[in-house]
Image (spheres, rainbow, N blue to C red):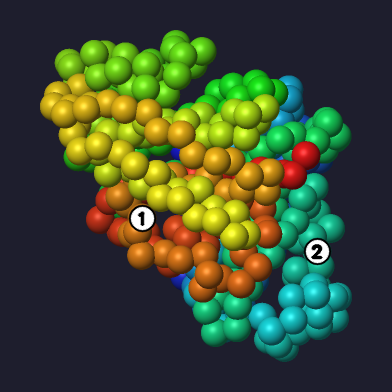
Amino acid sequence: MNESTAIAITEQSQTGEARRASLALATRLGFEETERGKVGLLVTEVANNLILHAGRGVIVLRAIAQDDLLGIEVLALDQGSGMVDVEECLQDGFSTAGTAGNGLGAIRRLSDFFEIYSQPNKGTALLAHLWAKTSPHSPPKLIEIGVVALPKRGEEVSGDAWARNGDDRRGLFLVVDGLGHGPAAASAASAAIRVFHDHHHQSPQRIVEAAHAALRSTRGAALAIAEINFEQQTVCFAGVGNIAASISSATEHHNLMSYNGTVGHEVRKIKEFTYPWYLNGLLMMHSDGISTQWNLDRYPGLSQKHPSLIAGVLHRDFHRERDDVTMLVAKGTGV
């Protein structure tokens, strides 16, 4: 359920494919007929918008949950001409493609949550959330997350995986990359996820140690675990292998340190490091399916957006097509 589904939109016929994929996901999540209809209509509008204004793009679908409610996240990514004035483009009747100009406005009205990030001549990222029932109005949370997790093109399953755990005192996050690709890599990643949840009450270092013992019968993995302590305003981090991780605020940036090795096989050292956490901070963790050349300073205002938009834009611009990919962004809400 944590994995995303990507549908390439390069021609009009793929609009139907995106709609069918979204309806299938809505059905699996228990959406009733009226809400399923909203999902299908929104995804159709999003796909049409990609064709009309960017010529091509991708729609990424993901199941999301909040408290006891399930929902669907729709992320549309393109590298088209972008928008100079997003708010103007959202007004009904505004069009640059000779249409009625109701597409973006309709998408916003259908959404329970809606946000856009766009740069002229660089592209647009659109995010929408739809819930199976009435949109949740739970107390503000200390952290929001956004994830794009996709298998290598041509693979049925991903060797990458991610997980979260924790409570109001601490948030625990894992990104794991099983060695290689395909089912054997996915099996190693799944074993790491099980250990993570079974030992979630322990420190990141202890969880990595437990994973090292548990993954000996698999092909092994690179993995990293970050624990945000909301009371102490710290991040404890332990990693082995090439999972990249960093913490950023408006004025600070820290790259988090991992040791070389393969969990389950050869690990030279497992050690936990502690870093400061910020109320509005960003924790970024990703597999080597994302190039490390990204820099948020090149995206003015992006850090203020929902973490799913941040993850989506960086995936769009820096993913390696010959690899599985997981990009996780955890964002402090300032609460």
- Residue 145 percent location from the top left of the image: 60, 41
Quadrant position of the C terminus in the picture: top right
**Amino acid type at mark 1:** Ile
User: Which residue lies at the image location 51% right of the left edge and 73% below the top edge?
Assistant: 298
* Point 66% across, 22% down: residue: 169
Residue type at mark 2: give it. Ala
Decide: few, some or many residues near mark 2? Use Cα within 10 Å; few <14, some 14-19, many ≥20: some
Q: Measuring from the top left, give residue 171's x and y in whole percent.
A: 58, 28
Going 86% across and 75% down the picture, which residue do you hit? 92
For residue 180, side relative to residue 193 (left or right): left
Residue designated by label 2: 106
Determine whether, in the image, residue 222 is placed left or right of residue 144.
left
Q: Is residue 50 above or below residue 110?
A: below
Asked which secondary structure carries label 1, the reply is loop
Q: Is residue 308 visible?
A: no
Marks 2 and 1, Cα distance to the nearest angstrom? 33 Å
Identify which residue is drawn at 74% across, 81% down: 85
* Label whose residue precedes the other's in the sequence (2 or 1): 2
Q: Residue 133: in sight, yes or no?
A: yes
Q: Secondary structure at mark 2?
A: helix
Q: Nearer the viewer, residue 251 or 290?
A: 251
Label ID, residue 290: 1
Residue 62 in the image: above or below residue 81: above
Question: Of tags 2 and 1, which is closer to the observer?
Answer: 1
Q: Few, some or many C-alpha atoms within 10 Å of disc 1 (few <14, some 14-19, many ≥20)?
A: many
Q: Residue 133: where, in percent of width, then height?
A: 81, 33
In this view, the residue in front, 36 or 74, is 74
Q: Are marks 2 and 1 in contact (CB under 8 Å)?
A: no
Residue 266, given in percent of the width and then of the height, sits at 13, 27
Q: Is residue 51 above or below residue 157?
A: below
